[in-house]
Amino acid sequence: MIKRALNVTREADFSAWYQAVIAEADLAEESGVRGCMVIRPWGYGIWERIQRLLDDRIKATGHENCYFPLFIPLSYFEKEAEHVEGFAKEMAVVTHHRLKSDGAGRLVVDPDAKLEEPLVVRPTSETVIGAAFSRWVQSWRDLPVLINQWANVVRWEMRTRMFLRTSEFLWQEGHTAHATEAEARDETLKMLEVYRSFAEDCLAMPVVAGEKPENERFPGAVATYSIEAMMQDGKALQAGTSHFLGTTFSSAQNIRFQNAEGQLELAQTTSWGVSTRMIGGVIMVHGDDDGLRVPPRIAPWQVVIVPMLRDTDEDAALIDYCKALQTDLAKQSALGEPVRALLDLKPAKAATKRWGWVKKGAPIVVEVGGRDMAGGNVSVIRRDRLYRADGKLDSVVVAQGDFVAGIGAMLEDVQSSLHSEARARLDANITRDVTDFAAMERAFDGRYPGWVEVQWSKPTGAELDAVVERLKALKLTVRNVPGEAEAADGACIFTGKPAVERILVARAY
Amino acid sequence: MIKRALNVTREADFSAWYQAVIAEADLAEESGVRGCMVIRPWGYGIWERIQRLLDDRIKATGHENCYFPLFIPLSYFEKEAEHVEGFAKEMAVVTHHRLKSDGAGRLVVDPDAKLEEPLVVRPTSETVIGAAFSRWVQSWRDLPVLINQWANVVRWEMRTRMFLRTSEFLWQEGHTAHATEAEARDETLKMLEVYRSFAEDCLAMPVVAGEKPENERFPGAVATYSIEAMMQDGKALQAGTSHFLGTTFSSAQNIRFQNAEGQLELAQTTSWGVSTRMIGGVIMVHGDDDGLRVPPRIAPWQVVIVPMLRDTDEDAALIDYCKALQTDLAKQSALGEPVRALLDLKPAKAATKRWGWVKKGAPIVVEVGGRDMAGGNVSVIRRDRLYRADGKLDSVVVAQGDFVAGIGAMLEDVQSSLHSEARARLDANITRDVTDFAAMERAFDGRYPGWVEVQWSKPTGAELDAVVERLKALKLTVRNVPGEAEAADGACIFTGKPAVERILVARAY
């Protein structure tokens, strides 16, 4: 039995393990403010990498960034009943604009500073951005409008969990307006594909992209699509959504344009977003019992150099050797960017630092001691294959020059090995041979670590509600209709009617 | 008299001109939410450039980014009286977490969803970050803590003005904790210098860096430093501040560490920030009667290519010619980065586009017509020198290859010419020969477009209050004590006592 860096394993208690990774990898912590977390440098560094890489892709598809107000007047929500129904129960509301002293040394809200109209802290920005679109769009020449914002949003969740469900979270929300339904539907699918390929290529996180069932649509959407990732406990995580909104918001916010024939039409809109929740996905897809493993593309530091200092005269030469190594590495490229290498000179023992970086999940840790330096070598640890077959730490001595020359290939190999491992797990854990409801009940009995793909008749209304209830009793939900699933052929496992499509059913976060 | 692109000149009405630039350059607009603006793509693109360039400098000086909660419990502010005194009157307060229908079709705040403790929307984050520091800092080995966050903050301003003073604004706020006062004071000055050099090098905006007088200190600070820029109407704009906070917040938030001798000490902290206000400064320093002029380093697009399309068969070849130009430009470097070139293919007339980009202030606009293409040329307009001496638009025909080869040098020349122009204006408009108060009154009589540098005895308490009142009657304030000013020599112009330092006095935004 190998002693691992964390005190809890995935096998023993997945939920406690998740919290332990967040704490031990210095990703985030409770803030003392209900439901809000502090994102620490290593966690925020991963978010910055996600932002940079995804932002490049959002811009490459023709979108521009803007910034809209944090506060949305309450009346904006009254215009779209279904939308407000979906969010009203979890809105933080600003009602006053001043504090005062109560005369006894305590601060209180000043009752004389009540706002005429309460302001909602944005839970999402369709209403306020729709109002802007109605000012910007007059003619078909003004379309499409393709914008995005990176922002914080607030949803007053009753039960919170770091990264997965917090009262305040960070995200990007894209909003677009188009002249035709076909163009808006294309946009919705284009951004779904941006999310899918981003998750696969950058997060090394395989996902299934597809349309959500009617009961899981975004409030106000005509169609909602998602990417779903499989966590190591077999649960699904919705990691991004893209919505075709039709004319729901253009009706409510009056986004009209004169078409080429001079007639007024309502614009067709879309919205799409991903959030800091993705980091929760990265933890639960790539983490192991020694902590996090960060895919190189999103690692704030891809290579961390730890000099084995001994408080002797040799230290200065060792530091110089490590600095030269850092400089050489920064001149190399990996995955299309310069290598990001850190020299860790903090005042701590080398072994403490090594395990700190293992828990953080830096892709490659390089230790350099006097003997390494004397031989012109470095000792290299790859985070994706930490142990040898005999259970010992797999630290390999390599000539410094060879290590530098091979760093690009090595980082690319770490990226793809993490992806392959997760892809194999996903593929191995989707069961497709369930043909009746009883078999599905049996499939999820005990600790089945995966998903079931079954076919259904795409029920709606009360019939769908009944299906949702039956699934809910098993703690299951319909995740989506995989775009790449085979055609249905046979009976719906819920209604017995002819099936029309195949769906993914899973437990979910 | 040249017809200019804006309907109002700086000379005629500076304030109306400022609003016109913001509207005509598509920088921002009123949002319909009190005191909050919508930052449009061109304005937000400038902010993204500012973020990228300043973030690099913040990281290069050893700071890491984090993210702290938007909401701060009211009780956090009770711990530091002076700090809350400074902000209590302008705080947006969340008191409820749910809306409900009133039964008559209107949405109302649900009185049953009142928070036990009101939450303040952060006006600045010393209190909540100090609470985190108190968890992070135990030993001298944990110091220094050097962090920064990019965030939105809210101050409920009564009179707002786009970019300069809005209820919500975007900024970065750095927060650090140190073992010694000397180290914290060094940090304060180091970040002041980062701001100064950033303003000069990236914004092409000359500034005067120095310490603020006692009455202008940040609430809770021991010392506050600022960079002050001169707008074209002669007013000063405080464009960034850096605060030495001593033990004010470490006392309030209990940030203590065990020193090397095993004794408990309070940490010494600093904070420093710049905001979207900088964009207001860029407008008022570089704008002219044709709109904005954006320094190339912070221009979202440095070169905009406008093909002169005519709806003929020749258009396709012209577009290909322009695409090749765009590709060639993107391979060049200017100011240390690849050139950012846009090909504008929007459905509008070429002249409309040209003037649109002139008003936005793109550094270089390239027009390409059939005749240019036939000759292997391009027609180049530099935004910093738009007109010839005879008043005609200064559009120069250049061989395409020469233009591409020279683009790096041309953009560097635009950057430095904007800086030189602003530097000359600043230097020419600081009067240093005012030796008594009456002379200062005369200096600011009428429309003196500048600042006065005078010497004073550095009064404190009631004596300072009296000085502040006398200045206020002239709508003047003390901006700062320029770090590079000469030593004082003679009498204070306010108190008649021996002067100890020289100060800048100005009208200000």
Image: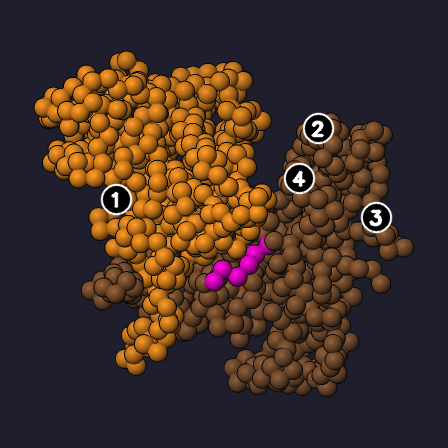
Chain colours: A brown, B orange
Query: Disc 2 marks which amino acid?
Result: Ala
Of the numbered discs 4 and 3, the one sitting upstream in the chain is 4
Residue type, mark 3 in image: Asp
Under mark 4, the amino acid is Asp
Q: Secondary structure at mark 4?
A: loop
Distance in Å between CA atoms under marks 4 and 3: 21 Å
Q: Which residue is mark 1?
A: B161
How far apart are the two marked residues, 4 and 2, measured between alpha carbons? Answer: 14 Å
Disc 2 designates what residue?
A: A316
Work out whether mark 2 precedes mark 3 in sequence or the reverse, and give the earlier one: 2
Rendering quarter of residue A91? bottom left
Q: CA distance from mark 4 to mark 1?
A: 46 Å
Q: Residue at x 83, y 48 (%)?
A: A394
Judged left or right of residue A413, residue A335 is: left
Q: Secondary structure at mark 1?
A: loop
Q: Same subunit under labels 3 and 1?
A: no
Is disc 2 in contact with disc 3, using a CB cutoff of under 8 Å? no
User: Left or right of A391: which side holds A281?
Assistant: left
Which chain does tag 3 point to? A
Query: Under tag 2, what secondary structure?
Result: helix
First to last magenta residue range: A27-32
Disc number placed over residue B382 in the picture, else none: none
Residue on which the image places disc 3: A394
The location of residue B498, given as percent across then percent down, is 20, 22
Q: How many marks?
A: 4
Subunit under mark 4: A
Residue A342 appears left or right of B258:
right
